[in-house]
Amino acid sequence: MKRPEINQLPDDPAFLKQLLLEKQNRIELLEEQVKLFKLKKFGKSSEKSPDQAELFDEPETEADDIAPELAEGIAPEGSDVDASQSEAPSIKKPGRKPLPAELPRKEIVHDLADHEKTCDCGCQKVEIGEEVSEELEIIPAKVFVNRHRRKTYACNACEGQVVTAPKPEKLLPKSNASAGLLAHVACAKYQDGLPLYRMEAIFKRMNIHLPRNTLANWMIQSSEKLQPLYNLMNDILLSSGYLHMDETTVQVLKEPDKQAESKSYMWVRKTGDPDIPIILFNYAPSRSGYVVETLLPDYQGYLQTDDYVGYHKTGNSEGITHLGCMAHARRKFVDAQKVTKNKNGKPGKADMAINLIKQLYVIEQKIKFKTPEERYQTRQEKSIPQLEKLKEWLDKSLQHTLPKGKLGEALSYLSKNWEKLTKYTEDGRLNIDNNPVENAVRPFAIGRKNWMFSNSQAGAKASAMLYSMIETAKANGLEPYAYLRTLFIKIPTCQTVEDFEQLLPWNVTLETVEGVKPES
């Protein structure tokens, strides 16, 4: 902005004061933005407040764990004692955890030499016990070739009716990849975030030539075979009556009418019912609200999202109840807390908001494993009064806070979304925030830092399919490699809908992997 000359300034003192106030507000706003930018660029990514104990650091850290410094602030489950007066739960002592009992053991016996078993007095020593210690051993991936030999038979008498044993069904008939290899590559990339070029180098060390383009084609072709199973999961998800939804960026190099550096999006939907855990990823080239409509055709029930405008049209549709995310509201006050200064060391408005919201999470932690009926009853008795306190404080604070600045933005967000943020108290099945789906997005975001982009739309769609299968498997307590290997073995023989239904995570019987027995 061009600096005005002295003779261009108005003579009216009141008008000069107004100009000065506007300049000062503008400077403070810019200083907040610079400070927050520096904190996000160079500071810790945790949302934990430096000046006070907080309950969660959602969603960047595990939202299911209570922060250690808050342990003394949560009352025992079922207690009517105020949270601030409750006893702290016992602190776990640090130490090495025992190795899993289900792992096979290889016994290695260490004995004395024969001459050491003779005592100085001349008598023979007898064994009176032993000391046992364990160490974890690992053998790198064992690679071998399945050689299929199909026997052929003919009749010696008539030299006719030549019959050859049938060829086993394969997921990718024209490739030399087994179900185990395909599952290994998929888990390495989509579960462990290992780019294909690194896998190519690892195989090369084993003297195996598997170019990354071959691996990429395998993943695309494998993902296409999973479509019938995905369709079944999608039908169940859309009929569940309660969904979380979120989206995150993905870069796709080769997209029609788009530059390579432009953003595309991975959309994620998750069932809210913990008894039906389904997590589905969908690639889309845009962040348009049209994508939401496409992914939720004829959906009826609860929809929980953040306040991105793309969800508004669908959220306002007849038959849909739109829920907000208290974690997002809290996060804005955390940003405001980072850039505002408290005079005389007294708590500011951002501190007050965070503390009031914290008490809502204390209640949620205590009823986390209760039935929906019990959760509903507790929220009516405790959460609603706490929300009323928060609303009373919000209405007063809005009257004395400028709308610009991080604090003004946080207050405005809380006020604008108040109805959606409090809907969770109406049903014990509902969550206070959208963290369940944000936690489901995290593995994708971590993997994206390693493989960075998808080369094509086909690759992005394959990623969405395989992430869907892996994350849904994990949500159902299945080991991802074992589940994918089972799918890749059994899908080639599936012929009916019932066959695919047997492969849903809660129905499947996993194929066991033949192991190598340790030497005795």
Image (cartoon, helix red, strand yellow):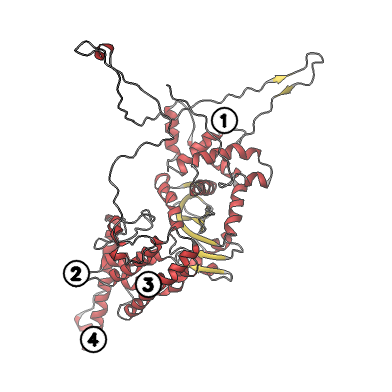
Q: Disc 4 on helix, strand or loop?
A: loop
**Horizontal side, residue 190 vs residue 363: left or right:** right
Residue tagged 2? 345
Q: CA distance from mark 3 to mark 4?
A: 50 Å
Percent position of residue 516, x then y = 47, 26
Disc 4 packing (10 Å; few <14; some 14–19; many ≥20): few
Mark 2 or mark 1, earlier in chain: 1
Q: Amino acid at mark 1?
A: Asn
Whether label 3 touches label 4, CB < 8 Å: no
Instruction: Pick the quarter of the image with the N terminus.
Output: bottom left
Is residue 11 shown to the viewer in this render?
A: no
- Pick the front one: 170 or 19: 170
Residue ID for mark 4:
10
Residue, x 25% and y 86% (percent of image)?
Answer: 15
Please name which of the two marks, 3 or 4, marks the residue nearer to the observer. 3
- Sequence-wise, which precedes: disc 3 or disc 4? 4
